[in-house]
Amino acid sequence: MVEWIAENSWAFWLIVVLVFIGIEMLTLDLWFATMGLGAAGGVITDLVGGDFWVQLLVFAVLTLILMIFLRPVALKHLQKPSATRTNVDALMGVQALVVETVTAQSGTAKIGGETWTARAPAGVTIPSGSHAWVAGVSGATAILSPSPIPAS
């Protein structure tokens, strides 16, 4: 086995690259990806004629450098929180066109091209044809406000 590795160290490093990338696909934490890239450095070192000890040194140094400098930057970009609001959160503060007068008991409004059952706060009436803003959603009912909702 040792003789085969000494004669075919490029193949050994290629197997190491594939194993590390395979493990990375299961873990998704970028530790094994950096080791896979370090092993790729071992392949390149062998192809340019470096001894096996030089290949090991390139693997170790390159992996260490990638873990210290590249991994934190890559993780920061991969874990960036999305600023895009979705589902009910996307409706908050959106303008609605009142189709049927909205009171605390009944009403409908068009929100984003869809007709919603709508309600207003107690004591508030929003007349048909006027614009209102979505203050909240309760189940499948939009809670409307006659004045704009401050951005949060």
Image (cartoon, helix red, strand yellow):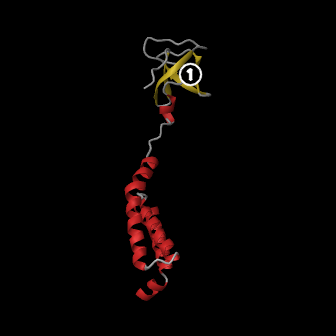
Above or below, comparing residue 151 to residue 31 in the picture: above
Above or below, comparing residue 36 to residue 15 in the picture: above
Residue 105 in percent (x, y) is at 48, 18
Residue 147 in percent (x, y) is at 49, 15
Q: Secondary structure at mark 1?
A: strand
Above or below, comparing residue 3 to residue 140 in the picture: below
**As drawn, is 2 to the left or to the right of 95?**
left
Location of residue 151 by image quarter = top left
Residue at image location 41% in from the left, 86% down from the top: 2
Q: How many marks?
A: 1
Residue at image location 38% in from the left, 68% down from the top: 60
Nearer to me, 104 or 87: 87
Nearer to me, 125 or 78: 78
Q: Is residue 1 visible?
A: no
Nearer to me, 101 or 152: 152
Q: Amino acid at mark 1?
A: Ala
Quadrant where the N terminus is found in the figure: bottom left
Q: Which residue is tagged 1?
A: 96
Residue at image location 44% in from the left, 52% down from the top: 74
Residue 89 in percent (x, y) is at 47, 32
Q: Is residue 121 visible?
A: yes
Location of residue 3 by image quarter = bottom left
Quadrant where the C terminus is found in the figure: top left
**As drawn, is 115 to the left or to the right of 85?**
right
**As drawn, is 127 to the left or to the right of 137?**
right
Above or below, comparing residue 146 to residue 51 in the picture: above
Alpha-carbon neighbours of circle 1 within 10 Å: few (<14), some, or many (≥20)?
Answer: many
Residue at image location 49% in from the left, 83% down from the top: 8
